[in-house]
Image: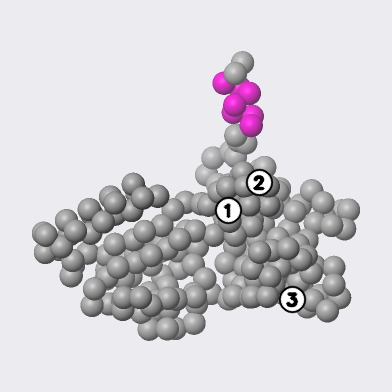
């Protein structure tokens, strides 16, 4: 981490030396987390925050006030249109993007999305993913497709009171409306997805084919 930080510092100092600071948007983020032994796990494909949540730091002098934080829900698919909006090129974006330009939420405090979603385990274009997460500001609902018929395929966490994701509230009748709302949002999201242009081939199958 110290090595990485030193190179980020070099990059920022170089922008200062070249006098490019005022016309450069700097983004620090990553593609995923890794459990790093949290909950005894070492995986990047889980829906716990240690795996699914990523850092997102921005520096844009004159537009973003240093030291401020923003709780808007943003997903990787939103990054491209949002970066375009921040630098003023949103009019050039293609019309068929899945992500949303959240510039208004970042710069002017406008309301962001009510939900954001993460998907893992696409088995085919016509089958439900292995697991899906619907995340709102306070709640996180995870649906495990293989366990739905057994009555234990839903997990609900109160991310405000339980940020370590320890207590599953999905079966508690007090939270049935929250489960229903997040489930409905999840279904709408999945129904909105377009089928891929090419057949979906699972990575496990590809590995076996390479081994043969």
Tag 2 residue: 41
Residue at the image position 58 percent from the left and 47 percent from the top: 36
Residue 51 is tagged as 1
Does residue 206 show up magenta in the picture? yes
| Label 3 – label 2 distance at C-alpha | 28 Å
Q: Does the image show residue 125?
A: no
Tag 3 residue: 178
The percent coordinates of residue 133 (x first, y second) are: 65, 60
The percent coordinates of residue 74 (x first, y second) are: 49, 67
Quadrant in the picture for residue 53: bottom right
Work out whether mark 1 precedes mark 3 in sequence or the reverse, and give the earlier one: 1
Identify the secondary structure beneath mark 2: loop
Identify the secondary structure beneath mark 1: helix
Q: What stretch is highlighted in magenta?
A: 204-210
Residue 206 is tagged as none
In this view, the residue in front, 30 or 78, is 30
Seen as rendered, the residue at the extreme left is 18
Is 106 displayed left or right of 46 in the figure?
Answer: left
Quarter of the image for the C terminus: give it. Answer: top right
């Amino acid at each position: 981490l110290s090595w990485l930080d030193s190179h980020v510092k070099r990059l920022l100092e170089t922008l200062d030396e070249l006098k490019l600071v005022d016309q450069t948007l700097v983004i620090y983020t990553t593609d995923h987390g890794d459990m790093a032994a949290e909950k005894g796990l070492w995986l990047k494909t889980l829906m716990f925050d240690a795996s699914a949540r990523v850092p997102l730091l921005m520096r844009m002098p004159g537009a973003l006030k240093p030291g401020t934080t923003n709780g808007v829900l943003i997903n990787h698919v939103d990054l491209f249109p949002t970066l375009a909006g921040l630098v003023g090129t949103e009019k050039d974006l293609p019309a068929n993007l899945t992500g949303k330009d959240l510039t208004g939420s970042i710069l002017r405090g406008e309301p962001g999305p009510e939900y954001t979603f993460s998907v893992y385990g696409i088995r085919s274009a016509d089958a439900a993913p292995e697991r899906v997460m619907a995340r709102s500001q306070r709640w996180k609902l995870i649906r495990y497709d293989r366990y739905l018929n057994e009555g234990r395929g839903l997990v609900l966490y109160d991310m405000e009171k339980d940020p370590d994701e320890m207590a599953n509230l999905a079966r508690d009748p007090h939270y049935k409306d929250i489960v229903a709302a997040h489930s409905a949002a999840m279904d709408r999201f999945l129904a909105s997805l377009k089928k891929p242009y090419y057949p979906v081939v699972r990575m496990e199958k590809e590995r076996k084919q390479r081994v043969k």
